[in-house]
Image: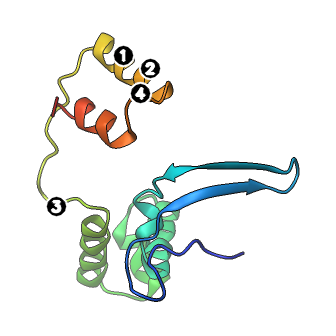
Amino acid sequence: MKILPTQCPICGGDIQVTRFYCQQCDSTVEGHFEIGRFMRLTSEQLQFIETFVRCEGKLNRMESEMAMSYPTLRSRLLEVIRALGYEPGREEPAIRVSDEERKRVLDELDRGRISADEAMRILQGGE
């Protein structure tokens, strides 16, 4: 299976997915699609996450499976957290959007009236 590249092999810029094709029904969907945070992780980071999930998030179980010390595993976990765009130890702000507002934003997104980025900004309280 081929992995979707996230960086241009020529200039190193971010890749933006603009087309999907289905061989079964011969359909093509075009647009500008976000690839998501996990697609930006290295294969080593994805392997770490897979092991982390398999071990139910218990680093002490991962020590023997990955033949790494607890401090090394903790360091790798912090690297993955940062690669996903979060700052370890910093709490995310509470979302204070009403259920009505959330539904309105999701309806607007579904109808294509706002972008996914705009919807996220509103839902995270950035109005």
From the image, state whether disc 1 or disc 3 is nearer to you: 1
- Report the front residue among 45 and 72: 45
- Report the front residue among 82 and 89: 82
Type of amino acid under label 1? Arg
Image-based side of 103 in relation to 83, left or right: right
In space, the residues marked 4 and 1 are separated at their CA atoms by 11 Å
Looking at the rendered structure, the secondary structure element under dot 2 is helix
In which quadrant is the C terminus drawn? Answer: top left
Q: 10 Å neighbourhood of mark 2: few (<14), some, or many (≥20)?
A: some
Q: Mark 4 points at which residue?
A: 113
Looking at the rendered structure, the secondary structure element under dot 4 is loop
Type of amino acid under label 3? Glu
Q: Mark 3 points at which residue?
A: 87
Type of amino acid under label 2? Asp
Residue furthest out toward the right: 24
- Report the front residue among 63 and 44: 44
State whether residue 126 is above or below residue 30: above
Percent across and percent down for residue 50 are 51, 67
N-terminal-most mark, 2 or 3: 3
Q: Mark 1 points at which residue?
A: 104
Q: 10 Å neighbourhood of mark 3: few (<14), some, or many (≥20)?
A: few
Percent across and percent down for residue 17 are 53, 61
